[in-house]
């Protein structure tokens, strides 16, 4: 039973020992806040359910490559229809096709990200609209008028929240479409959509390259994800027999809609989980070490109480009350810090492109997790030290004059944990160093062209209005001419992809040697471009010529290839003038190579996209898919932002139904490739800093404990004439062993993780990693040695007699 | 004099063992202490005086033999029961005072009573102040032990030892860390406790302080020599 005497004693002791209280409270509160903040992100990405009834039963079906276990594009109409006709696992089977819509009203034109889908999508969610209705089965019929449901944000942005928009007709990609409903604020299903356009579901199993679909549905009652997956895999194997080319080496995967989005960031989730747990454990251990030191320095007090007949249970109460006070206060602070971090730092760690249900919030599961963390931490750091301290022989405490009482076994355990903590800190620091280096490298990547004074914008022509290639070419030529007249614009060009972003993929093969690997064709990025593309980017061809107006639909099909690809296509000489197969798996055409371009980087400059430098460029007068959007790239004489409004107005004057996306400078667009690393750094830098401090605290605590136990020994050594330096060397030996063991262990861990990290995350050379490792080793060594020497230096200040008499 | 045995040791030994050597700190000792007695244990350093006192005070247990406290064989008692006896029947005075620095003088004296079941703080405080008055330290009750001289600290320790009205007070070299004047004062206080009816057992190697004892026993090399 706790009495007021103990409570008063605990409060007085904590108040008197302000430094101890301050350090412990900060260690616990920051440890809790940081680990909880990381956990909140893990929870949001991995565990948060879709905000619908039975949201965990909503599944997504996609095709993937069996060998590489990665997604293999969208499904076509015929296989989606095949699955629809035969599957029995899902209710509300529906197809979804991601699309960027051009939405035109009488007064404005906008680009909106959305999907084409059927009425079943809304049946899956069972969500009622805010205004009007959702899609109905009648909208899925072939002759139905296209219907559009818009999100709350699109309604506010495009229609200024006008409720009368429901029922009115607007143009979507040039087609008259009825706006039938507005969804509630926050509904962006299935990922982050702003518009849902009616779609006639596929109705044929004849193989054709139509559609780029995903399949969604809701598991029937009693059907598990595994059972559905099994059924779809069986159906996929049936398709493999009939459609060998498409399905060879591929299968179908059924996953929950939440898991599909979590999978691409799974490595990050795992790393964050490990870091969150490590930070919490490190905080716990550091606090435990400090509490043990305090307990040991107060061990004599416990012995006196024991001699006075106060039972061990009652002796334990005081430190438990002390630690309870500390944890209650630090826990409240930690939860507050976490809530503040979620409130103000969400923008730094989450992306605007994240799925709509990834809403980082300080909610009930986070608070419960926080309290659980706190309880576990209190049990570890509150009970262990008390048990350790009260397990000492009281009588010897009273007579020995030494304060420390824990045995050798405990000492070994603590030394091992300190080594482990040094190892964790080493890995965290190294990982953060590598992430920082990656961030720096991405920001300073040479993409192979001059990005100064380039303005970019994205547009997509309404397919119905620009169905013919000639119409599309004419539009872009006219747009280019108009833009070229704008003062300050040096040149304008167009391409379906810009360096630093992804283009669509095609397969290629050489006419000289077979480039297939394990039956798979080489994949490259295919980019239709305007004739002046390379000139505008300031890129000189390595060999051959650029495209000209003579390269048309009716002339010979030509291609410019990147230097890296040229070497593969024609390893024994120049590739210029030779032919290559395009999409040989789909009986594609032979193209004549007319030029070789330097290697530009497409996609973020990370190593997981192997073919980022293998690119083929085709003249847009020969190929420009109707579904593909086009980047406008304008070279300007001055700050490109000054021309944004002029460009938008000019585009609108040519065709009001064409919308340019928000314009940006090329520098900014390339810089956004570093945003992933930036978010990584925002997460890991505080954790690493805390780990760094925690390591120092633990080492300090261990050293202080040794000094408590051996001050008398040092006094004797001094009395016998040993110099301080010699004594220091004797006592620092243990620190060097712990430091060395921790660094070696950390290095082994990092080397084990390295292949995975190199493949997934970083673009840092092994030399750079070595340099970072050396820096981290140095920093950590200095910290550990310094922290370890502080208690020793305090003992050195004593004269030999004082050290001998020190109790 | 009362001849009722308060405690008795029978063939008690205490052995400290290392991997190579066994040292008999106390070797098959037999004696008893009667209620109301003032027993002095004397002898040279290393003779086993403090070890036998720690066994008598239930701070340590014998390796062999039996120790009866008020007729109860102590090896059969649990840790909690031993604590209860220490708390209710025994008062301790140590050579190095052993006051708790983080507590005030008053809290130190209240400490043995405050954890007793049903203890009322006001009554405990009154009793502690009464004891402090008896040793002449009531005026320093709110001070920290670190603010007191050695003699004053030992007077507080005497107050703490007598606050529970114990059956016996054990004192282990209570004057060892004191100047002669303070030593006189402390020994007078202990003598006073005996005169008030308390049983006292004191370890000392100073012959001056065995004179007040009703009986003296001598230890050498772990054995009782007289």
Image (cartoon, grey):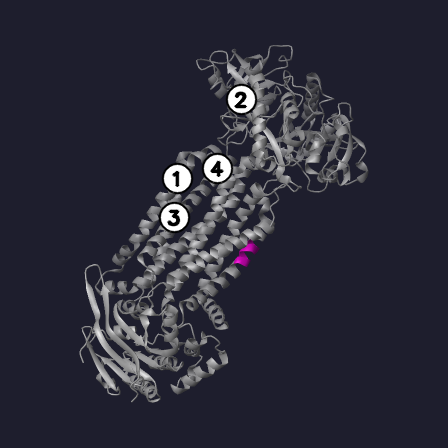
Instruction: Identify the residue at horizontal 56%, vertical 41% (top origin).
Output: A46
Where residue A199 appears, x then y in whole percent? 71, 27
Q: Is residue B44 visible?
A: yes
- Of discs 1 and 2, which sits in the foreground? 2
| Residue situated in front as seen by the camera: A140 or A694 | A140
Task: Give the labeled residue for mark 1.
Answer: A771
Task: Give the labeled residue for mark 2.
Answer: A524
Marks 1 & 2, CB-CB < 8 Å contact: no
| Residue situated in front as seen by the camera: A327 or A602 | A327
Q: Quadrant of residue A60?
A: top right
Where disc 2 sits, the SS reads strand
The magenta span reads A331-337
Where residue A127 appears, x then y in whole percent? 71, 39
Q: Chain of mark 2?
A: A
Look at the magenta stretch and give its main secondary structure.
helix
* Magenta residue check for A212: no
Task: Give the labeled residue for mark 3.
Answer: A420
Where disc 4 sits, the SS reads helix
Where disc 3 sits, the SS reads helix
Task: Give the labeled residue for mark 4.
Answer: A438
Sequence-wise first label, 2 or 4: 4
- Horizontally, is B161 left or right of A329 in the view? left
Where residue A627 appears, x then y in whole percent? 66, 23
- Of discs 3 and 1, which sits in the foreground? 3
Q: Do callouts 1 and 2 point to residues on the same chain? A: yes
Q: Give above or below for A120 relative to A33.
A: above
Q: Do callouts 1 and 4 point to residues on the same chain? A: yes
Instruction: Decide: few, some or many residues near mark 3? Use Cα within 10 Å; few <14, some 14-19, many ≥20.
Output: many
């Amino acid at each position: 039973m706790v009495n007021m005497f103990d409570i008063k004693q605990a409060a007085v002791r904590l108040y008197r020992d302000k430094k101890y209280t301050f350090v412990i409270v900060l260690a616990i509160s920051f440890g809790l806040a940081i680990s909880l903040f990381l956990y909140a992100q893990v929870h949001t990405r991995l565990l948060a359910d879709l905000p619908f009834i039975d949201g965990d039963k909503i599944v997504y079906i996609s095709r993937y490559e069996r060998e590489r276990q990665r997604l293999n594009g969208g499904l076509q109409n015929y296989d989606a229809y095949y699955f629809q006709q035969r599957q029995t696992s899902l209710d509300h089977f529906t197809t979804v096709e991601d699309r960027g819509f051009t939405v035109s009203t009488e007064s404005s034109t906008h680009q909106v990200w959305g999907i084409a889908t059927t009425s079943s999508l809304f049946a899956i969610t069972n969500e009622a609209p805010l205004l009007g209705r959702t899609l109905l089965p009648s909208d899925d019929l072939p002759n139905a008028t296209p219907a559009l449901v818009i999100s709350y944000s699109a309604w506010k942005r495009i229609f200024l929240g006008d409720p009368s928009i429901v029922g009115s007709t607007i143009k979507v990609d040039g087609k008259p479409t009825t706006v039938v409903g507005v969804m509630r604020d926050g509904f962006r299903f299935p990922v982050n959509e702003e518009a849902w356009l009616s779609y006639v579901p596929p109705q044929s199993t004849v193989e054709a390259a139509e559609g780029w679909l995903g399949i969604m549905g809701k598991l029937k009652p009693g059907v598990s994800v595994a059972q559905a997956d099994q059924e779809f895999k069986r159906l996929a194997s049936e398709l493999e027999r009939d459609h060998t080319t498409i399905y060879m080496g591929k299968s179908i995967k059924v996953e929950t809609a939440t898991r599909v989005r979590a999978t691409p960031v799974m490595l990050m989730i795992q790393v964050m989980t490990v870091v969150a747990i490590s930070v919490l454990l490190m905080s716990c251990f550091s606090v435990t070490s400090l509490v043990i030191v305090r307990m040991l320095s107060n061990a004599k007090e416990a012995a006196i109480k024991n001699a006075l007949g106060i039972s061990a249970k009652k002796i334990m109460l005081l430190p438990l009350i002390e630690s309870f006070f500390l944890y209650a206060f630090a826990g409240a602070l930690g939860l507050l810090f976490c809530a503040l971090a979620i409130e103000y730092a969400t923008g730094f760690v989450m992306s605007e492109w994240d799925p709509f249900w990834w809403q980082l919030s300080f909610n009930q599961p986070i608070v419960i997790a926080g309290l659980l963390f706190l309880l576990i931490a209190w049990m570890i750091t509150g009970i262990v030290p008390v048990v350790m301290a009260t397990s000492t022989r009281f009588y010897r405490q009273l007579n020995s004059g030494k304060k420390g009482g824990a045995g050798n076994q405990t000492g070994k355990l603590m030394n091992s944990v300190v080594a482990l903590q040094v190892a964790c800190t080493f890995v965290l620091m190294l990982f953060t160093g590598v992430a920082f280096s990656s961030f720096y490298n991405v920001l300073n990547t040479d993409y192979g062209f001059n990005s100064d004074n380039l303005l970019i914008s994205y547009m997509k022509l309404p397919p119905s209005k620009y169905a013919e290639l000639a119409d599309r070419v004419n539009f872009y030529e006219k747009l280019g001419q108009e833009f070229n007249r704008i003062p300050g614009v040096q040149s304008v060009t167009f391409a379906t992809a810009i360096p630093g972003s992804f283009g669509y993929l095609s397969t290629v093969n050489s006419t000289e040697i077979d480039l297939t690997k394990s039956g798979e064709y080489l994949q490259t990025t295919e980019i239709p471009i305007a004739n002046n593309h390379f000139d505008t980017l300031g890129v000189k061809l390595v060999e051959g010529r650029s495209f000209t107006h003579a390269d048309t639909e009716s002339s010979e099909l030509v291609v410019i290839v990147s230097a890296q690809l040229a070497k593969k296509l024609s390893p024994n000489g120049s590739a210029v003038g030779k032919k290559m197969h395009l999409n040989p798996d789909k009986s594609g055409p032979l193209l004549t190579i007319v030029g070789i371009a330097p290697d530009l980087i497409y996609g973020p400059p990370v190593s997981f996209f192997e073919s980022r430098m293998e690119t083929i460029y085709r003249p847009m007068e020969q190929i420009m898919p109707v579904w593909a959007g086009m980047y406008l790239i304008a070279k300007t004489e001055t700050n490109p932002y000054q021309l944004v409004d002029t460009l938008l107005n000019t585009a609108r004057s040519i065709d009001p139904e064409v919308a340019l996306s928000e314009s940006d400078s090329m520098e900014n667009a390339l810089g956004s490739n570093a945003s992933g690393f930036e978010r990584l750094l925002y997460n890991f830098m505080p954790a690493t800093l805390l780990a760094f401090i925690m390591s120092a605290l633990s080492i300090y605590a261990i050293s202080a404990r040794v000094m408590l136990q051996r001050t008398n020994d040092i006094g004797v050594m001094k009395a016998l004439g040993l110099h301080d330096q010699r004594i220091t060397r004797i006592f620092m030996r243990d620190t060097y062993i712990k430091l060395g063991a921790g660094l070696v262990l950390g290095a082994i861990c990092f080397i084990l993780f390295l292949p995975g990290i190199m493949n997934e995350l970083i673009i840092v050379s092994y030399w750079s990693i070595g340099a970072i490792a050396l820096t981290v080793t140095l920093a950590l060594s200095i910290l550990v040695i310094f922290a370890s020497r502080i208690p020793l230096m305090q003992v050195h200040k004593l004269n030999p007699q004082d050290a001998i008499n020190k109790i | 004099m009362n001849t009722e045995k308060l405690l008795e040791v029978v063939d008690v030994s205490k052995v400290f063992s290392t991997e190579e050597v066994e040292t008999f700190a106390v070797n098959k000792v037999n004696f008893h202490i009667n209620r109301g007695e003032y027993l002095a244990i004397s002898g040279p350093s290393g003779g086993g005086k403090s070890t036998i006192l720690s066994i008598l005070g239930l701070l340590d247990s014998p390796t062999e033999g039996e120790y009866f406290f008020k007729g109860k064989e102590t090896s059969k008692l649990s840790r909690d029961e031993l604590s209860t006896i220490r708390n209710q029947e025994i008062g301790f005075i140590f050579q190095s005072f052993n006051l708790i620095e983080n507590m005030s003088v008053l809290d130190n004296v209240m400490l043995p009573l405050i954890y007793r079941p049903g203890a009322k703080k006001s009554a405990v405080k009154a009793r502690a102040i009464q004891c402090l008055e008896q040793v002449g330290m009531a005026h320093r009750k709110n001070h920290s032990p670190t603010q007191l001289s050695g003699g004053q600290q030992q007077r507080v320790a005497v107050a703490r030892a007598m606050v529970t009205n114990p059956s016996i007070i054990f004192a282990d070299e209570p004057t060892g860390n004191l100047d002669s004047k303070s030593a006189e004062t402390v020994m007078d206080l202990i003598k006073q406790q005996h005169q008030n009816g308390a049983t006292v057992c004191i370890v000392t190697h100073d012959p001056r302080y065995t004179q007040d004892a009703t009986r003296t026993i001598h230890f050498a090399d772990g054995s009782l020599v007289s």
